[in-house]
Image (tube, coloured by chain):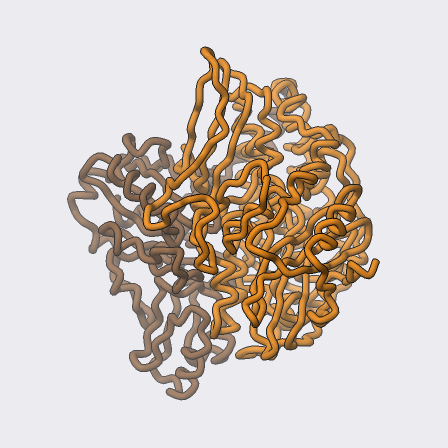
Amino acid sequence: MLKVIKNRTEQGYRTTKYPEEAINLYSRYRGLPTVHQDCDKELARQCAEACPQEALNSDEMVIDIGRCTFCGQCEIQSEGKFVTFSNNFELGTSSREALFTSGSLPALAEHSKQHFKKLFGRSLQLRQISAGGCNACEADTNVLGTPFFDLQRFGIDFVASPRHADGIHVTGPISYNMKSAVLATYEAVPSPKVVIASGCCSISGGPFFGSKDVVGDLNSLLPVDLYIPGCPPHPMTTLHALLQYFK
Amino acid sequence: MDNLLQVTNGEAVSRSNIPNLDFNTFRQTILDETRHNGFIVQFFAYEDEEKTLKLIAVIRSGLHLYVTGCSLADEYPALTVENEKFHMFEREIAEQFGVHPKNHPWLKMVRYHENYRGKDDVFGNDYTEDIPGNYPYFTVEGDSVHEVAVGPVHAGIIEPGHFRFQCAGEEVFSLEIQLGYQHRGAEKLLEQPGMAMNRLPVIAESIAGDTAIGHSLCHSQAIEALAGLEVDEASKIIRSVALELERIACHVGDLGALSGDVAFNPPMNYFGRIRGEFLNLSMTMAGNRFGKGLVRPGGISFSVLAEHRKIICDKIASETPGITNVCDLLFSAHTVIARFENTGTVPRKLAEELGLVGYSGRASGLSYDARVTFPTEAYDTVKANVNARTVGDVFARASVRREEIMHSLRVIPELLSKNIDAQPIPFAPGYTLAPDSFVVTINEAWRGEVSHCLLTDKDGAILRYKVKDPSFHNWTGLAMSLRNQGISDFPLCNKSFNLSYCGFDL
């Protein structure tokens, strides 16, 4: 018992005051990218060609952050002349199209379905489904339950049964071997329900795009309401998206 | 020893030097070699340029690594009959290439996919149907026997898999674990003809995202060996530090989860927060909390300078007392000890028969640690860790993790004490790989021995890319640890192993 009290004192109170107070991530974190429109076309073309994720379009000068793993290679290769990654972790969108960006995203709160805010604004229970995820997305979603983020203080929680859930939060490129389980879980959630695609795998197949063993796009199976990009999304990206979209 | 070629970790050799034995000699050679103190690192099939099906076995014995091979017919007498270590490997070969290992005692699919050669399915599955397919489960019959089926979707934020328990009352007679739900075709993607070289590391670090550094190290070392790339000392140090940070983060997180599983909440919450501190240190170097993007063939992608070294060392110095105290809190609470001790025991003999690796093996007295036996990167300078409790129960697996955390907390400042700046590798669009070559790489990631094996064809294209996550060995250990346990101990046993679903499923 004494040890419990001693440790409690040592550990202190660690929960972030976000969103009242801003959080600054370490400068090396790669968040929302900017595609510099004035970049030399040839350099842009070379970077686009070398992008492992084929996420860059040098004709339209946009990057698909639903496909990007934020590896930062394009920034290195172009020495920041074509693409630079900012520290901004606010990446969630309500449409797939908005993820093709040159540096700005629509304000998520204004593009939410308003009846969702009314229904789920005070209490949102989600069923997480890992469908071919590499456990990075899963781990950084799980982390929202730890004291620093303390997701439950916002009335948001991850629940065991889809029957208790208001929606599903899907990670992974939807392996074919998980396809029916994803659909069955979705079916088991009472309507109206929310579908969240988290991580570039569930949005576009991520690193596994082109594999014949994955569906590669959750939206082709179920109507996605909220997209959370990243490989994996930073916990703050997920937290920001959930708060903006539902609160 | 003409039947075996001795190789070293991460060294490319010509494929023509690998013995091509007749099947019976091959079978006898690797059975002899794995009977005592010999363990399987890799055992897989591939089709050569003439579409001849061949087998490759990489065996470790003591401080040595051996490779050998043979041609394979459509059926052969199973090796599992004589040595259980081959059990899952033979099932994998049967699934991937439609080969029948005769008299295999438990011939079931591993991941549920069509074989690569268009042969009749060994398991009688119809792959136009989504999972679940044609699954025979081991069943126990009797009036008081009941069956519990769990998954693939579990009660939590966790990867999918199916667990089938045969119980009488609360006691589990048998647990069978059926995975495959996470199968993304990683190997096929890595060896896909015409695959862009720069996609490979991105795929490799997503084989198991919690082992991103472990798998990307294996990948990079293999490419480095085949392309003749040299890695400088500073980069080797940083790559080792990254692997240790990954180890600390995962072990700390798991000790917290184990604490939660026995309803002791304070360490769960403290460790949950502390784990994040170490993920953030990976981000300090890589810009990604799992270290994705850091390790690339030839070195590292980002500079790691005095500023970063200081952040890492300062954080380790400030967190170490807290970790020590929370560990003490966890391991001295009698409610915790009562649940951890004598739960889910895998005795040494069984661990040896199954070929367990990593902390799961070390907790059962198998001291193998690839950092010591086959050191890569900067590990030749690192002092080995020793484990005190090795009786194979949950307490032992938890204690080994605690010891490894404390060991890594010492190792990282030691590694960084050389104070040399690590510079990023220049951008390279691709590499030329040595033709007709073979390389095997091994690293001790946090779960244990990760290994990648590459074969190139006459043009230097990747002919076969074989990945083995330590979970491929250890899932059977979890199943065995549940024998005659209360079913309510399953979460605890499961978390003490904490195996990878996607690393197994590929």
Residue plotted at (48% across, 72% down): B193
Q: Quadrant of residue A92?
A: bottom left
Residue at the farthest right position: B1
Q: Quadrant of residue A17?
A: top left
Residue A26 in view, yes or no: no
Residue plotted at (49% across, 68% down): B199
Residue B336 in view, yes or no: yes
Question: On the picture, is B338 further left or further right than A231?
Answer: right
Residue plotted at (45% across, 11% down): B143
Residue at the farthest top position: B143
Question: On the picture, is A210 further left or further right than B343?
Answer: left
Q: Quadrant of residue B283?
A: bottom right
- Which lettered chain is shown in brown? A
Residue B150: % across, % down: 42, 30
- Which lettered chain is shown in orange? B
Q: Nearer the viewer, residue A147 or B39?
A: B39
Question: On the picture, is B298 further left or further right than A24?
Answer: right
Residue A88, compared with residue A145, is above or below; it is below
Placement of the N terminus of chain B among the 4 image quadrants: bottom right
Number of marks present in the image shown? 0
Residue A242: % across, % down: 31, 47
Q: Nearer the viewer, residue B89 or B211?
A: B89
Residue B14: % across, % down: 71, 72
Residue B233: % across, % down: 74, 68
Residue B71, compared with residue B106, is above or below; it is below
Residue plotted at (43% across, 24% down): B148
